[in-house]
Image (cartoon, helix red, strand yellow):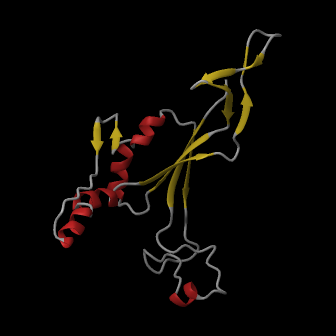
Amino acid sequence: MEVDHDRQVVHGETLGLTLQEPEALLAAMGPSEEHVASRLTSPIISTHLDTRNVAFQRNKCGIWGWRSEKMETVSSYEAKVYSATNVELVTRTRTEHLSDRDKSRSKAGKTPFQSFLGMVQQHSSHTGAPMQQAASPTNPTAISPEEYFDPSFSLESRNIGLPIEMSSKVQRQHSD
């Protein structure tokens, strides 16, 4: 389920299984045409925690001069209290598969993750550009099948498929 609090809408996908003929069971397991169309006309969003620069520090309690390391009781166990700094929540949105109409529609409404995150401290955008004249919309750098399957040929600087259109948003956790 995806919840959009701003628009007060819940999008849900369910998988219903009943004891039927095998063919009917397989058909029931697949997504409806509505859900497929919705996914194909929506941005691809992935969210992850970037923990490369995380640092942990013991929390202290008490009055200046008489401070000690903070301890708490959790389920009858004494636990040391730490704080984490430099934690980043990264949300990436890909839109190269969308038409201009779908792109403008997706910009109008926020995703559930964007509503949840609130303010975003950093916004950057990357649009991959092909290095050569495109042979077709799905092969913009004109890579031939021979080049693609040749292990000695390097594809590092050439994209297969549409040029990448991706925006990244980062929410940083600040220490007190």
Is residue 47 positioned above or below 17 on the image?
above
Q: Which residue lies furthest to the front in this view?
A: 76
- Where residue 58 appears, x then y in whole percent? 74, 27
Q: In which quarter of the image is residue 77?
A: top right
Q: In front here: 93 or 98?
A: 93
Q: How many marks?
A: 0
Q: Residue at x 49, y 77 (%)?
A: 134
Is residue 35 positioned above or below 1 on the image?
below
Q: Quadrant of the C terminus?
A: top right
Q: Which residue is drawn at 36% across and 58% down?
A: 100
Q: In which quarter of the image is the N terminus?
A: top left
Q: In this view, does 106 lie to the left or right of 54?
A: left
Q: In front here: 110 or 87?
A: 87
Q: Which residue is drawn at 56% across and 76% down?
A: 132
- Where residue 143 appears, x then y in whole percent? 53, 83
Q: Is residue 168 left or right of residue 109?
A: right
Q: Residue furthest right?
A: 65
- Where residue 83 appears, x then y in whole percent? 67, 30
Q: Residue furthest bottom?
A: 146
Q: In front here: 43 or 69?
A: 69
Is residue 117 positioned above or below 167 on the image?
above
Is residue 31 positioned above or below 115 on the image?
below
Q: In which quarter of the image is residue 43?
A: bottom left
